[in-house]
Image (spheres, coloured by chain):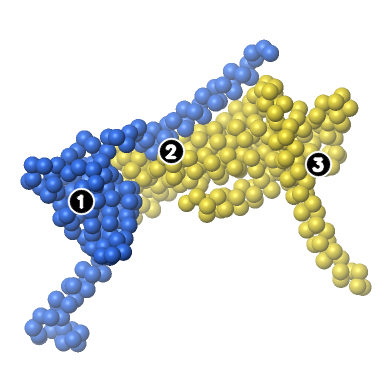
Amino acid sequence: MKRSTIDLWVGLFVAIGIAAITFLSLKVANLTPQSDSNTYTLTAEFDNIGGLKVKAPVKSSGVLVGRVSNIALDTKRYVANVTLTLDGKYQFSRDTSAEILTAGLLGEQYIGLTQGGDPDNLKTGDHISITSSAMVLEQLIGKFMTSFADKPAAGGSDASQSQ
Amino acid sequence: MMEKLLSPFRHLGELTVNAIWRLGFASRFLLAILLNSGQSLLRLQLTIREVYFAGVLSLIIIVVSGLFVGMVLGLQGYNTLARFGSSDALGALVALSLLRELGPVLAALLFASRSGSAMTAEIGLMKATEQLEAMSVMAVNPIARVVAPRFWAGVISMPILAAIFNVMGIFGGYLVGVVMIGLDEGTFWSQMQNNVDLHYDIINGLIKSLFFGMAVTLIAVFEGYDATPTASGVSSATTRTVVTSALVILALDFVLTAFMF
């Protein structure tokens, strides 16, 4: 079996293909070789997670520090149990608070962590106790409407009709 | 009178029975290819030669059309996204639509019309000039010698071509979005990286193109092998390859998408 020119072209073709797949996985999908030992998980309970999804970013001061790895419903207390996987580089104090925020007006929802003052840090499996739920637009409008209706008749005919 | 009334139905029935007959033959043919591919993989030179004809020579059409598809996506996507004030998401839009759908599907359609038709014509002409029978007489199995190398060449080439199509498309989107329109380069890439998932988007896209490669090359070699050994028979087999491949690619795409996403 001899080497021929066709081999060169086919080799080049396969090399370009491998380069293309590498480009797609590194540059487009941002595959960062991250070992599991370098991360730690925390849990947090929310009354309402709104549109939060698995793999949603976890940010602190706007910096990406981890991702949501699991969302489950606690069927005893009927609250959402969210598991966060955080980068080991970033440590947070035990009284850190978590809230569900929205990027932009209609953007995706993410979890924002605010550092507390406790000298001890959260470890794997720890629980974030101070949480605030997602803002749900319907509830917000509902609250606004009821507070508007509860106001002592300010001469508005709309308020008296809605009562 | 009755005869004339019944003839359309008879024709329909004949078409249906024929289609099922050919489907069964094609399945048996696939099995024969798989059983005989040991020999052709041992003689790798045959497969490499076919990769050259099916894959390397398709590079130009894949690269050029990938670039233009990406540029069109960039332009159209920008016009639509700018209306909602979210032109930042252009990178994610271009990358996701290419990786999930357009890359595998368009590369497969181009591959079917560029290489699939050539395979059908070549094998059909070999059959018409009795070369396949001559091989059998010389105790050379034509499926192992002619068909299996082409089949594997198509299966190998298709994911590579789709990946190249994707890269060129993303580059085209980058050219239009960043170089021409002047969006922020950092936002373009970071939006893309935040929204594209390796397993979910890229691997699934490659799996799709692997399936398309199998389907297209199987149709191409089968149509060639099954062609009526005349000039018009080879010509209609080539036409059927392109038409059937296109339909099968689109139908398979729906099924695979429903499974994956």
Q: Are marks 1 and 2 in contact (CB under 8 Å)?
A: no
Instruction: State the CA–CA distance, disc 1 to disc 2.
Output: 42 Å
Left or right: residue A47 compared with residue B233: left
Q: Residues within 10 Å of mark 2 (few under 14, many from 20)?
A: many
Counting residues from the start of the chain, the first of labels 3 and 2 encountered is 2
Q: Between tags 3 and 2, which lies in front?
A: 3
Outermost residue on the front side: it is A76
Residue underneath mark 3: B227
Left or right: residue B30 compared with residue A136: right
Q: Residues within 10 Å of mark 1 (few under 14, many from 20)?
A: some
> Splitting the image into 4 quarters, where does residue B154 fall?
top right
Chain painted yellow: B
* Chain A display color: blue
Q: What kind of residue is marked 3?
A: Ala
Q: Which mark is residue B206?
A: none
Horizontal and vertical percent for residue A51?
Answer: 31, 59
Seen from the viewer's position, the closer of residues B45 and A99 is A99
Q: Chain of mark 3?
A: B
> Splitting the image into 4 quarters, where does residue A28 fall?
top left
Q: Does the image show residue A112?
A: no
Judged from the image, the secondary structure of the residue bearing numbered disc 1 is strand
Residue underneath mark 1: A127
Residue underneath mark 2: B170
Q: Quick check: A126 above or below A4?
A: below
